[in-house]
Amino acid sequence: MAGSILGFIISNKGYSIYWPYSVMLLGMNANKSEDSLRQGLLPFLASLCVFFLLFAGSSILHLKKKDVRA
């Protein structure tokens, strides 16, 4: 819950590309009447890829070390 509230605050400051919880707000253009993707589509897609690789990679590493093995 704190991450989503912080994501909304960061999105309002204009740094939404750098926080994973505010990327959804940026993509939906949910909290602004002007175009949120004025920086272009490439930085938005790059941040999506970075956050996906970061969280998927950390999840895979965690499951490899802590998962129950039969």
Image: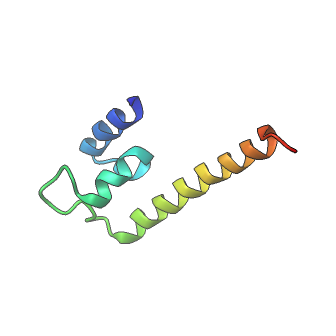
**Horizontal and vertical percent for residue 13?**
26, 42
The colour scheme used to paint the residues is rainbow
Query: What residue is drawn where x is 37% and y is 53%?
Result: 23
**In the visual, does 3 lie left or right of 27?**
right
User: Quick one: which residue is furthest to the left in this view?
Assistant: 33
Quadrant housing the C terminus: top right
Q: Is residue 58 above or below residue 36?
A: above
Q: In this view of the protein, which residue sits in the foreground, 33 or 30?
A: 30
Q: In this view of the protein, which residue sits in the foreground, 67 or 58?
A: 67
Q: In this view of the protein, which residue sits in the foreground, 18 or 28?
A: 28
Could one spot residue 19 in this view of the protein?
A: no
Query: What residue is drawn where x is 60% and y is 57%?
Result: 53
User: Quick one: which residue is furthest to the top in this view?
Assistant: 2
Could one spot residue 27 in this view of the protein?
A: yes
**Horizontal and vertical percent for residue 2?**
39, 29
**Horizontal and vertical percent for residue 62?**
72, 42
User: Quick one: which residue is furthest to the front in this view?
Assistant: 70
The number of numbered badges drawn on the structure is 0
**Horizontal and vertical percent for residue 15?**
34, 47
User: Quick one: which residue is furthest to the right in this view?
Assistant: 70
**In the visual, does 54 lie left or right of 15?**
right
Query: What residue is drawn where x is 39% and y is 31%?
Result: 1
Q: Is residue 20 above or below residue 35?
A: above
Q: In this view of the protein, which residue sits in the foreground, 26 or 66?
A: 66
